[in-house]
Image (tube, grey):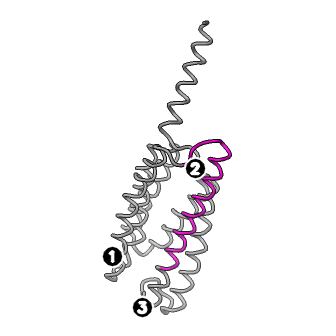
Amino acid sequence: MSNEDYLKDISEIKNLMHKSSRFISLSGLSGVLAGIYALIGAAIAYWLVTNRSGGTLFIFHGWVFWTCMFILFMVALLSAVTGIILTTRKAKKNNEKIWDNSSKRLLFNFLVPLLVGGVYCFIILNQGRYGQTGGLMLIFYGLALVSASKYSIGDIKYLGYIEIVLGLMASYYPGYGFWLWNYAYCLWHLDAF
């Protein structure tokens, strides 16, 4: 065998190792659609809160609070379902397995910080402390992205860092949490993927 054959074999081995350790079938379109869903949900929630609470974003009462929680849940559900459908389609197109060890590790590392953050945010919201929730959502979502980036494409890590920084800004300036959340989640999702 020539040196060229050896280099080709080493390149193939490296490619196989990369594929076995990272889940690379994530659909970029699902990230864009998640951003669009978030923009639509934020617009509906903003209209609902400002028209039902005297023009301020800081007053949530009864059905307004629960309606906004329902909107948030629907955005998350639509984003997850869209991500699963488009990622499955992409994996089938590329003849890759959708449910292997790398996808399990990706999902676990993404869901642990995300679910812990979601429960914590729900507790904070249920206690009527609305000012910090936008920042907390961004921080925990950013941590989930950074945690999952070890098992996916590397660019997700940088999106996670941006989400964390904007979450800290939203925590420091709680009056701007809604706008920073929209900028971070909606626009960066549209741009990152």
Q: Which mark is residue 48?
A: none
Q: Which residues are magenta?
A: 70-98
Q: Quadrant of residue 39?
A: bottom right
Q: Is disc 3 placed on a helix, strand or loop?
A: helix
Task: Name the N-terminal-most of marks 1 and 3.
Answer: 3
Q: Residue at x 56, y 65 (%)?
A: 79
Outermost residue, right side:
93
Residue ID for mark 1:
124
Residue type at mark 1 is Ile
Mark 1 or 2 closer to N-term?
A: 2
Locate residue 61, reporting x and y percent: 42, 90
In this image, 159 relative to 172: left or right?
Answer: right
Left or right of 58: which side holds 50?
A: right
* Marker count (numbered): 3
- 105 or 185, which lies in front? 105
Residue 68 inside the magenta-drawn segment: no
**Label annotation for residue 26:** 2
Residue 114 sits above or below residue 125 on the image: above
Q: Position of residue 192 (x, y in %)?
A: 58, 53
Amino acid at circle 2: Leu
Residue 81 is a magenta residue:
yes
Identity of the residue furthest to the top in this view: 2
Question: Looking at the image, which residue is at 56% across and 48% down?
Answer: 98
Dots 2, 3 in contact, CB < 8 A: no
Q: Report the amino acid beneath label 3.
A: Gly
